[in-house]
Structures are given as structure tokens and as C-alpha cells.
Amino acid sequence: MLSQTLKHHFEGIVWKIVTNEKQDFLAIEVRNTEERSTYFFVLNIEKSVFVAQNLSISEPWWVGIESVSEYFLYLHLYDTQMYAQHKDIICVSLSNKEKNFILKNHSFLGLENDYLFTNYNKKNLKLNAQTGQLIEENPSKTTKPNDFLNQILKIQEEDSYFIKLQQFILNISNLKAVKLIEYLDYESYMIVSFYHENEDNLMQNILCVLNSENATILLKIVLDDNLSGVGTNSFCVLKNKLVFCENKNTITIYEL
């Protein structure tokens, strides 16, 4: 059996999740539409413990996550409420939960090896990620893509492999997958997230973890119910931990 190491319910909707370059910290953006407030959480993946909870800034709603490191959380504001263009970068210290620096009118490009890459006045900049101080203008490299979700295969109905995987899911679960299947081979496990239609022609999103040797189901979880559409990135694997969100408001972690 798989061992659950964390299950945390948030008072709001999990809106965005990002990881750091080493993939050992996870930042979570939680939005409460009734209160029009936004809170941020940072999770140590290896220990399955929060190093920061309920972080907020003076702007409670028009703010969001850009990135995270072991020591800092990077947020953005918005240029206009109508077009929601990212504007300004706010660096928050995870140790004292205070603002470390603010970069006005900067757009976030990336975070790598203690360097923060931004665009300011149509110029790309390389900055010290801890202080925000300028290191170089127009550097040759400005960002590095974070591929922690790109390892997962996203297979749609029009893809040739969909029917084969659909039959496999039917054999193990007696459910017919539709629209989208997400699939990952990880060590001795097969991880599958899929959608199937219920009697009301709405969809249910189900996550299954199987033993790759004999296709035995080790874990079966309903991630969400009564859906009219599908979404990608329903799970990820970081530091031998399976991380997923249930019902848009609960983060769950299992040890693999």
C-alpha cells in the first residue's frame, strides 16, 4: 500500500502550483472568492511539511505567484484588472514572512541558480535573486523552463494512442475514459489520470496508481466530480512523492 504523508484542506480554491528549480519546494496560491483574498503556502516536498502558511500582502486579490526558491517566494501584481497583465515583482522572505524587495514595473522571466531574470523598459535584466540588485543587462540567457509537469504524457481523443490506453483503463477500472488521459511511468508504478462521463453527461476525474508489473491498482482517487470540461496537470511526482489536488481545495501527497 502507498503511504499518505500529507492531506491539507484550504479555505479557498487552489489556483496555481509552482515548484523551485530543484523540485523540493512547492508554492501554492489559494484564492477565496467570497472574501476576495489570496493566500500563499510553501511546502517542503521531501519532509511533507509547510515552511510558510497563509502568507498575504497588502493587495489581497490582484496578486499571484511567479516562482519560489528555498528561501524566497516571488509574487506579481497586475497592470490592469481588465487585461490582468503581470506587473511588479514582490520578493517575500520565507524566514521572517516579510517583503524582501519590490521591483516596480518589472515583468518576471525566470529564476535560476540564484539569479532572477526580468524585463524592464523593454530590456532583459539579470538580477541577484536575494537582493534584486542588477547584475547584467540583456544577458544571453534569460530563463530555464521548469519541466516538472512536462514528463507526464497528455493524450487526447484524437491521438492514435488514446484508444489503446482507453481499453487498458476499461480493463482495470470498468470505466471508459473520454476527452483526455494523463499518463506517467515512474519507477515501478504506472500513474493514470482520466475522465469518464456519468449519467448526467458530466465528467468525473479519477487518478489511479498501479503496480507496473501486474497492473494491480494500489490507489484510486476521485479528484473532482460533475465537471463540464477537462483540465491538464492533475498530478505531479516530485522527490518520489505523488502530489495532487482533490476537489480544487485539498492537496494530498503519497510516498512512492
Image (tube, grey):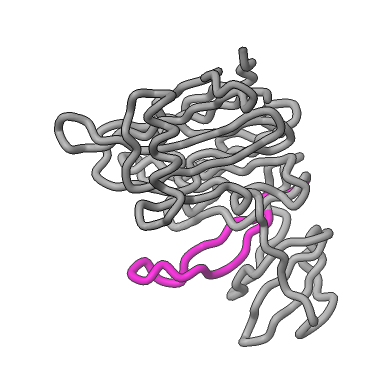
Picture coordinates of residue 139, whole percent (x, y): 79, 81
Whether 46 is drawn above or below 132: the answer is above
Q: Nearer the viewer, residue 254 or 6?
A: 254
Q: Position of residue 34 (x, y in %)?
A: 31, 40
Q: Is residue 251 above or below residue 81?
A: above
**Of residues 122 and 199, the one drawn nearer to the viewer in this rendering:** 199
Any part of residue 11 in sight: no
Q: Quadrant of residue 74?
A: bottom right
Q: Does the magenta-highlighted stretch encompass residue 85?
A: yes
Relative side of 113 to 200, left or right: right
Taking the spot 51% from the left edge, 62% from the top edge, the residue there is 77
Q: Which residues, given as a range, are shown in magenta?
A: 71-91
The residue lying at 72 percent from left, 44 percent from top is: 23
Quadrant housing the C terminus: top right
**Image spot of residue 87 (x, y percent):** 53, 70
- State yes or no: residue 46 in magenta: no
Quarter of the image where one finds residue 56: top right
**Would residue 142 be seen by someone viewing this image from the given angle?**
yes
Q: Position of residue 213 (x, y in %)?
A: 64, 24
